[in-house]
Amino acid sequence: MQLRSLRAAALVELVSLVVLLVNLSTVHLEPVTAVMGPAHGCAYLVVVVAAWRSASATAMARILALLPGVGGLVVLRLLTDPRSV
């Protein structure tokens, strides 16, 4: 169950970051920022907490979870790739 929530949060974090950056570089609509900013922040916190609570996560995986945007995907890769053990 924890891996599923980490996967969902990592995807939401990445998509929300892309939306925020595209909005910032184009039209910079305030409603988009008002919705996606908190969504990105919450998803980031869920990724960090899920990675730190995972029993199979190494110290490096826990540190990499702190990277905004891609940290969750990197941790997922480390936790699901059998070659990374």
Image (cartoon, rainbow, N blue to C red):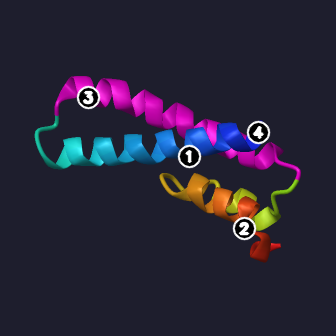
N-term-proximal mark, 2 vs 3: 3
Q: Nearer the viewer, mark 2 or mark 4?
A: 2
Residue type at mark 2?
A: Asp
**Picture quadrant of residue 39:** top left
- 21 relative to 60, above or below: above
| Gap in angstroms between the C-alphas marked 4 and 1 | 12 Å
Q: Secondary structure at mark 1?
A: helix
| Gap in angstroms between the C-alphas marked 4 and 3 | 29 Å
Neighbour tally class for label 4: few under 14, some 14-19, many 20 plus, Cα within 10 Å: few
- Residue holding disc 1: 10
Residue 37: image location, x then y, percent: 39, 32
- Residue holding disc 2: 81
Q: Is residue 50 magenta-colored?
A: yes
N-term-proximal mark, 4 vs 3: 4
Which residues are drawn in magenta? 29-55
Q: Secondary structure at mark 3?
A: helix
- 4 relative to 73, above or below: above
Residue 76: image location, x then y, percent: 66, 56
CB atoms at circles 1 and 2 under 8 Å apart?
no
Residue type at mark 3?
A: Val
Residue type at mark 4?
A: Gln
